[in-house]
Image (cartoon, rainbow, N blue to C red):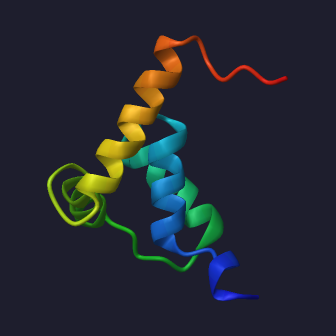
Amino acid sequence: MTRQNRVTIKSVVFDAIHRTQGTIQYPELKEQVLERFPQSAFQESHWAWYRYQCTKGKYARINKAIEGALAYENAIGGIVSE
C-alpha cells in the first residue's frame, strides 16, 4: 500500500467532516473511527483537537477553501456533468 492510499484516523476524520459538511458529532465520528480502527482509543478530546485545527489551526486555510468550493457548488445548483 502506498503512502497516498494509506487510511489513517486523520483521513477518516477529514472524510467524515467533508461528507457531512462539518456537521458530524462526536458519537457518530467515534463509530466511524472504530469501524476502521477497532483498537483505537479515539476520545472526545481527540475530536476537539481536530475540530480546532479545522476551524482555527493548521488545517483552517484548507478547510476555508473547501467551504468556499462547497458554497459555490451549492449556489450554482451542483456540478453539471456533460
41 lies left or right of 57: right
In this rendering, does residue 59 appear at all?
A: yes
50 vs 67, nearest the viewer = 67
Q: Residue furthest right?
A: 82
Asked whether, in this view, residue 22 is left or right of residue 7, the answer is left
Tell me the quadrant of the picture where the C terminus can be found.
Answer: top right
Count the labels in the image. 0
Any part of residue 22 in sight: no
Q: Is 39 drawn above or below residue 51 in the view shown?
A: below
Q: Position of residue 13 (x, y in %)?
A: 46, 58
**Quick one: quadrant of the N terminus?**
bottom right
Residue at the (36%, 48%) spot, across then down: 26
Image coordinates of residue 38 in percent, x first then y, are 59, 73
Q: Residue placed farthest to the left in the image?
A: 56
At horizontal 58% and vertical 11% (from top left) the residue drawn is 77
The relative height of residue 60 versus residue 33 in the rendered view (above or below) is above
Question: Which quadrant holds residue 45?
Answer: bottom left
Identify which residue is drawn at 21% across, 49% down.
Answer: 55
Q: Out of 54 and 41, give the one closest to the viewer.
A: 54
Q: How far across and down, in percent of the image, does residue 57 sit? A: 17, 61
- Position above or below: 62 against 19: below
Q: Going 34% across and 49% down the picture, which residue do you hit?
A: 63
Task: Please name whichever residue, 38 or 16, is drawn nearer the observer in this view of the structure.
Answer: 16
Viewer-closest of 60 and 72: 72
Q: In which quarter of the view is residue 52 placed?
A: bottom left
Where residue 37 sits: x, y (%)? 59, 74
